Amino acid sequence: MSFRIVVLAKQVPDTRNVGKDAMKADGTVNRSALPAIFNPEDLHALEQALSVKDRIEDAEVIILTMGPPRAAEVIREALYRGATSGYLITDRKFAGSDTLATSYAISLAVKKLEPHLVIAGRQAIDGDTAQVGPQVAEKLNIPQVTYCEEILEVKEDELVIKRRLERGIEIVKGKTPLLITVHSSAPQCRPRHAKLLMQYKHARTVSELVDETKDYTEMMTNKPYLRIEEWSVADLDADVQYLGLSGSPTKVKKIENVVLAHKDSVALTDEDKDIDYLMKELIDSHVIG
Amino acid sequence: MHNIFVYCEIEDGQVAEVSLELLTKGRKLANEINRKLEAVVIGHNLKGIEDQIFPYGVDVIHVADNSRLYPYLTLPHAEIIVNLFKQEEPEIAIFGATSVGRDLAPRVASSLKCGLTADCTSLVFGDHTENKTGKEYKNLLYQIRPAFGGNIIATIINPDTRPQMATVREGVMKKEIFNSTHKGEIKHVNVDTILKESHMAVEILERHIEKQKINIKSAPIIISGGYGVGSKENFDMLYELAEVLGGEVGASRAAVDAGFVDHARQVGQTGITVRPKLYIACGISGAVQHTAGMNESAKIISINNDPKAPINQIADYTIIGNVADIIPKMIKFYKKNTK
């Protein structure tokens, strides 16, 4: 059996470039105004998976994502960069899931795939919680290594991993099956490969095929690798009470739009007299000097 | 039962700063609802560790002392905490939002099937009425945190699961000794009955704890640059001002992402939280994810050519103009008028 790696990836709104239209009048986030991107640390995770695939014979990299139907975009992006196949977990019943309910759903999908290794980004930029990785590992009852900067060595049942911590580094050895979360200090993901882009640009999920005006029947029959599998609650044999709002112990009590408190401030220009005045004030009040 | 628990991180025999900050917060929360404050310490050679912990007003310390428990490893620590929490049924459990706390807390929460909120900036009690059922809850822990890249502030509650778990970053809460002669009870955890060989699946081969070379957290003065500084070269001016004033250089995420400065200098929600006596923000517009990490600075000066930059609203002084013109003038005046 080949060495199987599952990469967990999430499509996220690009919260780093929030423009004026990002918030609706009622204070909620206008997700449609934000571009949807491949979560940055998940790209680092994909690179670590691909680098393992480069180093050992007969390895496969499966990209797994959970989200609305359009999250299939993340799977295509991963295929263009070297992933071997992908699965999309999608169902309205997942809506409103917190990290615990999300981890439950993802862990069921991972179990079906029986990988040696699960690799995910440390955290997603829309929530910055870093919780889903460790929670999936716990649900799978396998060990975890978080904050990975690089997978240094790979053997069939053992990996050596460098971790990046606040005040230094740690080199650890772990046995498979293992879940790893990858830190932003890890190497950037390799770019799209032109050949793979040509090969996979027509990869579609079943839901996407329904919306296509072009007839894909023949293409999908001749090139079965273009079919992106979708998994619903029923496919995962999931217990709905552990999903969505009912499966989420955390509830959002209140959301506030951020408004900076105004305080009296002294307005100055860049003229010498203003700068001199400011510096004198700071020196006199012992803030500096 | 139903007390407030704080997980204390240990490094080289010292309780981490963040843990002491959380004990201080934990004491206040415990007083409000009339519960005990309990600390959990897991490591090796922990004799005397209580001397660092009791002064923060801790009533009970649970000590798990075993050679397999230091340095930190996920599975053994998680297993001990899960066992302890099942037995003690805490009302609230708080962890530092460090690489240890953020590795450990989710594993524990998943095992106990309870709610966890990461990187809280405020923890207060409040009531709640469930809309559908009309059920009322008293004294729930409101876990307040920025979300969505800092553009919203969310208040999260865990109505039905216990413990109510949260992580908090270093520097967010304030450390304060409760009573230097305070003493409580020490309870020893029987480690050998809990740990199994399977918990040792990950092995540490090598570890160098390097003191962070760049330490902006303890700097009394921070000269911080944003994307508006324009280039890596322009940052040299900030380093010069920092050197002259005896401070450190900080940066916004945009400046770090642009490659102007090292990540270790990043101030804000995904960087470091600072509260220096003087914070000079140069070319920083002031997105909330940045201001969340510096708005408690004693004095804030904003240098920006945009009079409408949001940071100006929290600044004590606003200088409208170019960073490259203004900083040399500041250096010049300071050199001329001191010593």
Image: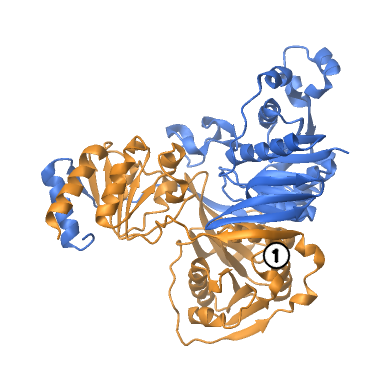
Chain colours: A blue, B orange
Q: x and y percent of residue A251 in the render? A: 62, 54
Q: Secondary structure at mark 1?
A: helix
Q: Residue at x 12, y 55 (%)?
A: B337
Q: Is residue A36 visible?
A: yes
Quadrant occupied by the C terminus of chain A: bottom left
Q: Residue at x 66, y 48 (%)?
A: A181
Q: Residue furthest right?
A: A1
Asked where in the image residue A74 lies, by quadrant, the reply is top right
Q: x and y percent of residue B238 in the render? A: 30, 46
| Label 1 chain ID | B
Above or below B219: residue B185: below
Judging depth in this view, the residue of B296 and B62 nearest the camera is B62
Q: Is residue A101 visible?
A: no
Above or below A270: residue B4: below
Above or below A216: residue B255: below
Image position of A221 (left or right of A44): right
Q: Mark 1: which amino acid?
A: Ala
Q: Residue furthest left?
A: A273
Residue for badge 1: B78
Judging depth in this view, the residue of B122 and A187 nearest the camera is A187
Judging depth in this view, the residue of A199 and B303 nearest the camera is A199
Image position of A42 (left or right of B291): right
Quadrant occupied by the N terminus of chain A: top right
Q: x and y percent of residue B64 in the render? A: 67, 76
Image position of B87 (left or right of A168): right
Q: Residue at x 72, y 66 (%)?
A: B76
Q: Residue at x 82, y 15 (%)?
A: A217
Dot 1 crowding, Cα within 10 Å, few <14, some 14–19, many 20+: many
Numbered-mark total: 1
Q: x and y percent of residue A29 in the render? A: 52, 39
